[in-house]
Amino acid sequence: FEPIPVGAPDGLSPFSPCRCGHTVISSSQTLEDVSRPPYYPVLDIIMAKVFGLVLGFLTQTFTYPSQVWFSPVGVNNGQVITPELSISIQETLDVWNITGLSVAIVPKSGEPEYHSWGNRTEDGESVTPGTLFHMASVSKAFCVSALGILMDDFEHGRNVTPLPPALTEFNWHTSIQDLLPGEWQLMDEWASRKANMKDILSHVSGLPRHDRSYGAYESPKEAVSRLRHLRMAFELREQWSYNNQSKWIALWLNKGVHDNVTIIPSSVYGNASQSYAVPIGTPVDSKHSIEGYGLGWSRNSYLGHDVVYHSGSIPGLSTLISFLPYDDVGVVVFANGGDRAASVMDISNTIMDAALHLRSGPALPIMPEKKAIRFPPEDIANLELPLEEFSGAYTDPGYGTFTFCSPANSSSYCQQVITNFTAVDSVQQSAPNSPQLLAAWPRVWTSHLRAVHLSGNKFVLLWTTLFPEGSSQLKTCVVSQPPYYPVLDIIMAKVFGLVLGFLTQTFSYPSQVQLSPVGVNNGQVITPELSNSIQETLDIWNITGLSVAIVPKSGEPEYHSWGNRTEDGENVTQDTLFHMASVSKAFCVSALGILMDDFEHGRNVTPLPPALTEFNWHTSIQDLLPGEWQLMDEWASRKANMKDILSHVSGLPGHDFAYDASESPKEVVSRLRYLRPAFELREQWSYNNQVI
């Protein structure tokens, strides 16, 4: 593009012809600037340079039609913009003093529906479906699309333009320093070296807008040369920058205040509940928005309602705690069944539907996917060595040591391991027939390992949790079922003791809490119909017990429970204690936030490590744990802070099988240096339990 302004901008700004490839856009197609700021020609020029830079790379020839007309047929064979909605939109325009508007409703297939309101000039010329508006920053989506096409061309050999010497490929992870050698430099050394295409396009380079630092007629090279002199607002990838359980939820609904006493400081509330990373960048369905992750809380939108929540899962249990800050209600769901996140979320959503009157009746429960368990085919002859030669101890500094047994091993350890697997396999519908090695490996997320022969010296490693004696006195062999609930009760008590022990206030924990089930909206949320619907979901997903609390901002919660907590038929009640699993992260963050607030205001004067003068979300973990904290990546070791690890952007993946529940935090931390990162620090959200 080479747009040339014709005259000073006074009202609209007609342009001389603009060249795009081999097609000329007629000068009769004026840029009809409805808000008529004098800066638009400047933006046009910047826009032209961006497109000139990007489109100049492309190998295809693009034809730009002189005029495109669509018939206003609307979606679903009818108009979306009804007369009533049109009047409502006009009222909005009047309130906000918007003189003109153009709208298109675009279906996946078929013709778009166009509507327009108001004027495009002070002379009373109407806005029409053919009126051209400047795209402004919408152009960024075009820029990214063009770059993506270019990357695809390089990948598939359609573009063979020589790349700079340091590059062999061009993709989203390409370093800007390698792409612009000798030109690209930021104030921060690490950001200069590590920033890639994805970083700058998703606005996590660390640079703020600095919009007044560049002029309309500067070349891209001139603009880039100035970046080294512009102060960073954040470190690279640190932040996006454009260039009883029911009482707990009630506390969050009231923004940390209980009985006019601030329990969670406002700074903690804000830091914990706002999002810093985007773990789900595309909505999973039409009901949910994309998802952000803050410190101990996830946040998304459900049918237009803001939801702050965290789910949890350990072998045998699934949990979910949610609160809707703008609807003054929260929902707690505890399920007696492992790996049931989808169904627990569906139940919680169904309850929200009823509480907020979002549907006329309960929706049909979601159905689980039926995936057959496939084991490798039996192939004894293909073993390069006798199976016994593969047995023995295996060790890794990050994951520890385990001992594999073959059927021929006669040690007491191996006989017990083989007996446990035999007891469970005898009641399973399918079990591997191929040669296999077995091991006991007590971890939080697994109890045993099974290595099934694939080919040659290759084995498929399967993690599993066995309870060969069942989970109660019935002695039924099960896989991945809770071993004994009183044990979980004790763990729960210890979690509360650990978290509440941080707090400076004194909490009184009653031995028994009796609350009347008043519910929200002056009536029961869980109707008999809804209760039956929830029971259907439990039956489909084989969840043996469930406990739910609907928590209003004020007033008493509404409690309901279904099913059993043990195989002996003991019922789940509102007093049944469930393990919180990862929901505890919200407690952990709150406790840490209160501790930080205490340090800031002098209520805690415990000496900090020598390198620290303050303790907050930006405190370096290396300074907080001198001599202990170390990751494989040197920069991550040095730069990772509290906010990074609490929002799961340390770069480490789950590595859930690398630690055991009996280990001390110090032992877990000492092993982190041996665990391979999946990403660079702050490059991508990756859920991790052991770092937190």
Image (cartoon, grey):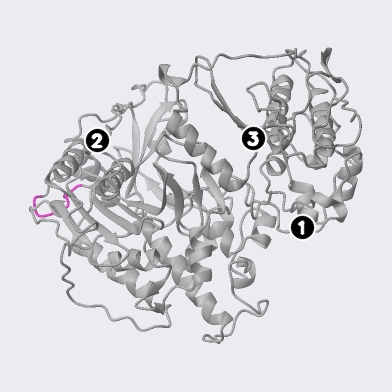
> Which range is magenta?
468-474
Which amino acid does the dot numbered 3 rest on?
Gly
Query: What type is the residue that disc 1 sits on?
Result: Met
Instruction: Report x, y in % for residue 672.
Output: 55, 57
Q: Which mark is residue 232?
A: 1
Comparing 635 with 95, the one in front is 95
Residue 365 numbered mark, or none: 2
Question: Which one is earlier in the sequence, the residue at label 2 or at label 1?
Answer: 1
Check the picture and name the quadrant holding the N terminus: top right
Q: Position of residue 24 (x, y in %)?
A: 83, 14
- Tag 3's secondary structure? strand
Inspect the magenta stretch and tell me whether residue 636 lies in it: no
Query: Residue 460's spot in the image, x, y percent?
Result: 41, 33
- Residue that appears at 58% across and 54% down: 650
Q: Main secondary structure of the magenta part?
A: loop
Q: What residue is shown with label 3?
A: 100
SS of the residue under disc 1: loop
- Three-letter code, disc 2: Pro
